[in-house]
C-alpha cells in the first residue's frame, strides 16, 4: 500500500494595493493568521465562481472587482 501525505502544496499570491494587476507568488509559505481566513475563503470562492468554474468564459474582470464586505464589526 502506498502511503500518501495529507498535506497539499498551496500556491499563494499577493499584489501591492497600488498595483492590483501586479500579482506575484509569495516567497514564503506563510499566508496569514487565523483572522485572515474569512478573506482567504472569499478569494477562493470568488476565483472558483468567476474564473475556474467558467472555462469557456472566465470573468477575470469580475474577479478583480469582487470586493470582500463581510468583515465582522
Image (tube, rainbow, N blue to C red):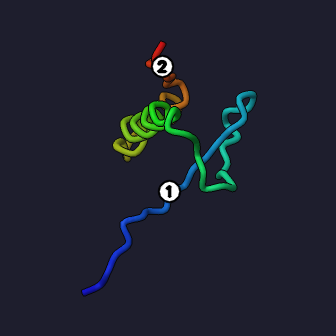
Which residue is disc 1 drawn over?
A: 10
* Sequence-wise first label, 2 or 1: 1
Residue displayed at 47% across by 36% down: 37
Circle on res. 71: 2
Q: Are marks 2 and 1 in contact (CB under 8 Å)?
A: no
Percent across and percent down for residue 9 are 49, 62
13 or 51, which lies in front? 13
**Residue 17, position as x, y percentages in the image:** 71, 29
The residue most toward the top is: 73
Of residue 44 and residue 34, the one placed in the foreground of this image is 34
Image height check: is 55 above or below 37?
Answer: below
Residue 45 visible in the shown view: yes
Report helix, strand or loop for mark 2. Answer: loop
Q: Residue furthest bottom?
A: 1
Q: Secondary structure at mark 1?
A: loop
Q: Is residue 60 left or right of residue 7?
A: right
**For the point 52% across and 34% down, which residue is it?**
36
Q: Residue 3: x and y, percent?
A: 32, 80
Query: Could you tell me if residue 58 is visible in this image?
Result: no
Mark 2 packing: few (<14 Cα in 10 Å), some, or many (20+)?
few
Q: Quadrant of the N terminus?
A: bottom left
The answer to which of 29 and 55 lies nearer the viewer is 29
Q: In the image, residue 2 lies at what x, y percent? A: 29, 84
Residue 9 higher or lower than 5, as above or below = above
Closer to the observer: label 2 or label 1? 2
Furthest residue toward left: 1
In this picture, residue 18 sits left or right of residue 41: right
Does 14 sit left or right of 8 as displayed? right
Furthest residue to the front?
34
Residue at point 48%, 12% (across, down):
73
Which quadrant would residue 64 be assigned to in this image? top right
Amino acid at each position: 500500500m502506498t502511503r500518501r501525505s495529507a498535506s497539499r502544496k498551496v500556491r499563494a499570491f499577493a499584489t501591492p494595493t497600488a498595483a492590483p494587476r501586479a500579482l506575484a507568488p509569495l516567497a514564503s509559505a506563510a499566508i496569514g493568521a487565523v483572522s485572515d481566513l474569512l478573506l482567504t475563503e472569499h478569494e477562493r470562492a470568488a476565483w472558483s465562481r468567476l474564473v475556474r468554474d467558467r472555462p469557456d468564459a472566465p470573468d477575470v474582470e469580475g474577479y478583480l472587482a469582487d470586493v470582500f464586505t463581510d468583515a465582522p464589526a
